[in-house]
Image (tube, rainbow, N blue to C red):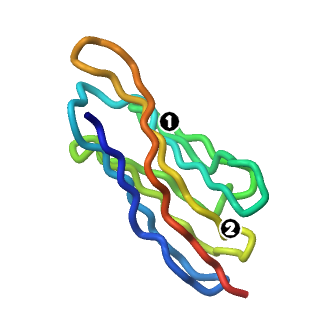
Amino acid sequence: QVQVVESGGGLVQAGGSLRLSCAASGSIFSINAMVWYRQAPGKWRELVAAITSGGSTNYGDSVKGRFTISRDNAKNTVYLQMDSLKPEDTAVYYCNVEWTSVRDRSYITWGQGTQVTVSS
């Protein structure tokens, strides 16, 4: 069984910063992509940032230049550094991990999400 747990959310003023963490644990042989999504009330879930096992990154247009994704492969953990936060960044942030089992099967596991609220 694999678990994905996000942490680091909270309340911050506009212009401030937060750092989210997402740790995967369990019967994982290797991790491929690690992805952050977010969903605000009444809106579709959207891609925030993604990082591959090789370190290639991709960002949603609304966060480019403000958010930075990174990962620690030894800890099976991905981070999202969020700077210059805006009220429109308010959402539940979800982590998604694409991993491979020892039987060479690929799976995607989602975390439960962490709330980020940015006040104006």
Helix, strand or loop at disc 2? Answer: helix
Q: Quadrant of residue 38?
A: bottom right
Residue located beneath label 1 in the image = 56
Eyeballing the image, is 32 above or below 13?
above
Viewer-proximal residue among 71 and 99: 99
Proximity of marks 2 and 1: CB atoms separated by less than 8 Å: no
Q: Position of residue 64 (x, y in %)?
A: 68, 55
Amino acid type at image mark 2? Asp
- Residue at (69, 47) in percent of width and height: 46
Q: Quadrant of the C terminus?
A: bottom right
- Residue at (35, 14) in percent of width and height: 105
Estimate how packed mark 2 is, as few (under 14), some (14 to 19) or many (20 or more) residues with alpha carbons within 10 Å: many
Viewer-proximal residue among 62 and 23: 23
Eyeballing the image, is 94 above or below 98?
below
Q: Position of residue 76 (x, y in %)?
A: 28, 43
Q: Quadrant of the N terminus?
A: top left
Q: Which label lies toward us, 2 or 1? A: 2
* Residue farthest right in this picture: 42
Q: Position of residue 100 (x, y in %)?
A: 33, 22
Q: Is residue 86 left or right of residue 19?
A: right
Label 2 and label 1: CA atoms lie apart by: 23 Å
Q: Quadrant of residue 8?
A: bottom left
Viewer-proximal residue among 80 and 28: 28
Q: Position of residue 44 (x, y in %)?
A: 75, 49
> Between disc 2 and disc 1, whose residue precedes?
1
- Residue at (41, 56) in percent of width and height: 79
- Residue at (49, 63) in percent of width and height: 114
Helix, strand or loop at disc 1? Answer: loop
Amino acid type at image mark 1? Ser
Q: Is residue 95 left or right of residue 76?
A: right
Residue located beneath label 2 in the image = 89
